[in-house]
Image: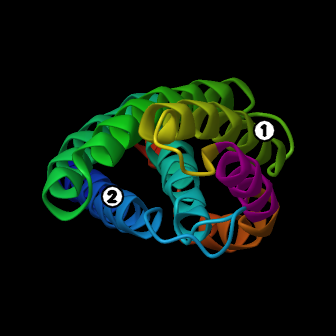
Amino acid sequence: MDDMRLHETVLRGIALGVAAMVVVVTASNILVQYPINDWITWGAFTYPIAFLVTDLTNRALGPARARWVVYVGFALAVILSIVLADVRIALASGTAFLVAQLLDVTIFDRLRRAPWWQAPLASSVLGSVTDTALFFSLAFAGTGLPWITWAVGDLAVKLAMALALLIPFRALMGFVPALRARESRA
């Protein structure tokens, strides 16, 4: 792959990651306002896809570009969420997202050479625990809403989704070539 084509492929990968991140986080911030019951909101089912996006970006483009996708996705999603969701939810989400996703990038990168499933599973689980604790306490503490049970239910769904999303992660690995190796040879 020549330098120009490689550069275009990397930029396309970053743009796709940012777009996916903005859609997932904005949708999750809207859906978290709609409880299914006292244990789960609809946002619990969409947000874990953000970890899949981060992990695929990290695998293909490396941790520096994955962090870039997180930063840009964070900024755009917070702006959209302020417009489309509650401001407190948008700010809580932005804080939790940034901390959890950057933790995800670091853990994934450290486990990069482990068997294929360990990096995405460990980084998603630890990121989910961090995100859930930060988000629900910042977004709902003091509101009178059942935020502790929502947090417990949300975390249970996120952990189940971390396992379930190993399937698309493995399937998509074949479509997401490791461009970092190609770049170092170019």
Q: Which of the pair 52/149 is nearer the observer?
A: 149
Q: SS class of the residue under badge 1?
A: helix
* Image coords of residue 3 (percent x, y): 22, 47
Q: Considering the image in quadrants, where does the N terminus appear? A: bottom left
- Label disc, if present, on residue 46 of the rendered structure: none
* Image coords of residue 16 (percent x, y): 30, 63
Q: Quadrant of residue 8?
A: bottom left
Mark whose residue sits in front, 2 or 1: 1
* Image coords of residue 136 (percent x, y): 55, 40
- Is residue 159 shown in magenta? yes
Extreme-right residue of the structure? 115
Which range of residues does the magenta coloring cover?
148-161
Q: Which of the pair 91/176 is nearer the observer?
A: 91
Residue that appears at 62% across and 69% down: 174
Q: Which residue is mark 2?
A: 13
Residue 116 higher or lower than 32, as above or below: above
Q: Which of the pair 131/170 is nearer the observer?
A: 131
Residue that appears at 54% across and 32% down: 137
Q: Name the amino acid type tagged 1.
A: Ala
Q: Is residue 4 visible?
A: yes
Assign the magenta stretch its main secondary structure. helix
Q: Is residue 1 visible?
A: no
Q: Name the amino acid type tagged 2.
A: Gly
Residue that appears at 67% across and 47% down: 151
| Alpha carbon separation for disc pair 2 and 1 | 23 Å
Residue 1 higher or lower than 36, as above or below: above
Q: Is residue 38 left or right of residue 102?
A: right
* Image coords of residue 20 (percent x, y): 36, 64
Please name the colour scheme applied to the rendered image.
rainbow
Q: Quadrant of residue 30?
A: bottom left
Asked if the residues shown at circle 2 and circle 1 are in contact, with their CB atoms under 8 angstroms apart, the answer is no
Q: Which residue is mark 1?
A: 122
